Amino acid sequence: MPFHTELNGIDLGMSELDLLDFLTSPDLPVAKHGLKRRDADLDPLMLAAVYSSGPQVTRNHYAHDFFPAVGDPRAEGAYDWTKWQPETTSTVGQKQQRRPRLKYVSRQEPRSQRIKREGTALDEEPKTEKHAPAATETSVQPPFPAPATSALAASPESAKPPLQVKCMARTRVPTPHGPVFLHIYHNNHDSKEHLAIVVDPAQLSETSQTFAPPIRSQSLDAVWSEDETEMDRITRGAYVGRLSQHSQIPSTPSQAKPTITTDSIPSPLIRVHSECFTGETIGSMRCDCGEQLDEAIRLISQPIALPPTSATADMTTIPGRGAVVYLRQEGRGIGLLSKIRAYNLQDLGHDTVTANLMLGHGADERGYEIAAAILHDLGLGSETGEGVRVLTNNPDKMQALTKEGIIVVERVPMVPRSWACRQHDAAHANKPAEPEMSPKRSAGATMIGGGAVYGEDLDKYLRTKVLRMGHMLPLIATGDEDED
Ligand SMILES: Nc1nc2c(ncn2[C@@H]2O[C@H](COP(=O)(O)OP(=O)(O)OP(=O)(O)O)[C@@H](O)[C@H]2O)c(=O)[nH]1
């Protein structure tokens, strides 16, 4: 098969890539005979499987993602390779001892067990699951919620119980942008700890005058058991005001009841952000995730100027308010391991979308049900609470949040700092400016801090998001366009 030959030489012919791009293009032309695009995920997946496997591996092998391990096969990388020794024969005179053989172990649990876990009858199991690649989650755990944007990772949604989220703890965290309340959420669809970073410093104020309803978790402030003590509540963060040796005031459930704000106060600014270890923790400049997280907390923390009212002659300023919902769906849902592999494919010249497809993943496997449930729990974007302004360029994210019942009153674009710099320079002066990183660096969250991510890798990544994923960002000329 020509694909294999090409892949083994790593020199993929353009015709195959063109075909893959063609099949996965968002605007695949309708054929003259009237037949519509086959939206089956099978075709790109099959191509991707053929690309990335040898002739001995079928698509079904691929879905199982066989991995040599003698340790716990449930987690990739769980085996401690330092303990591995090749099979040896023992020394003369001793009985021959066989060391454990490395064997191929499927990370996917047996089908019967999956069906039992998911409560699905054999015949009802969706066909797509067979073709779905092994998730980077351990196989014994429930899969991550089916993505809103990719049918590739479809899972039997109907077999899951209705989604419930519960805030397990909340605490004050001082940041360079001001104090935030970090909320840890558990849910009944996956085993990950998703987070909400709530910006609402007015809750720490000692004056009783508040202009906007506090952003509080209903599940945290609820009464969890009849015998819970005040100290139980305070320890989990269900308190009001500023917690200190001198102030320990447990909250009541009514304190988290959402209230509609007055029209004069802008709706809270929120961002739904997906985990990116590389961008946020080690300052990778392949993407702008670290910068976006910092920028989101910075923007949400900006004081809000209120126009003068009949009661106040002057403009009033209130503290910024809103939240970042931080979802543990690394690598657009494919996990860190696959993202790292995808980076290597990107170094070979493929873009971020094609690299995912070549690994048998969808371009974007994320879901936003949990984010929506967390927002609802915080009284944000719900009918009884407040509408929200959403920081994003991603149309899928907007659509998914709206579909999940979040009332979005405005989309606020996230312009990459380096692009904003260039636009500003182009408009104001002729001097070409590389964004200055060091002086402002310490003044931000994440390793990027207040600096800007820039470089060829980032520009390619951002252009791909605009051109292939439909991100709502005005493209600017960078001079590297021909290299794509
Ligand atoms: N698979 C893959 N994931 C990436 C790559 N670069 C960044 N990511 C992941 O992309 C995700 C970025 O998500 P978000 O910060 O929500 O941003 P977005 O979907 O681009 O949308 P915006 O709201 O406009 O920023 C994170 O999970 C990153 O880990 C890449 O090259 N490949």
Image (cartoon, rainbow, N blue to C red):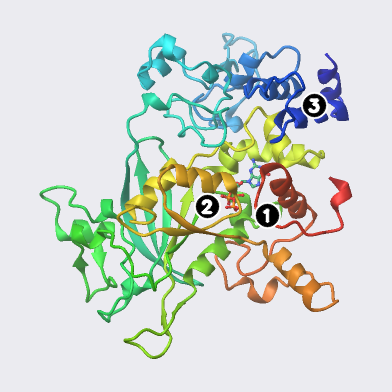
The residues bearing labels 2 and 1 have C-alpha atoms spaced at a distance of 16 Å
Measured as percent of width and height from the top left, residue 103 is found at 59, 15
Between disc 2 and disc 3, the foreground one is: 3
- The residue lying at 43 percent from left, 86 percent from top is 315
- The residue lying at 40 percent from left, 37 percent from top is 191
- Residue 101: image quadrant is top right
Circles 2, 1 touching at the beta carbon (< 8 Å): no
Image quarter in which the N terminus is found: top right
Which numbered disc, 3 or 1, marks the residue that appears first in the sequence? 3
Which numbered disc, 2 or 3, marks the residue that appears first in the sequence? 3
The residues bearing labels 3 and 1 have C-alpha atoms spaced at a distance of 31 Å
Q: For residue 19, which numbered disc appears in the image? A: 3
Q: For residue 284, which numbered disc appears in the image? A: 1
- Residue 106: image quadrant is top right
Three-letter code for the amino acid on which mark 2 is drawn = His
Answer above or below: position of 132 versus 447.
Answer: above
For mark 2, what is the residue? 273
Task: Please say whether residue 345 is visible from this viewpoint.
Answer: yes
In this picture, residue 98 sits left or right of residue 257: right
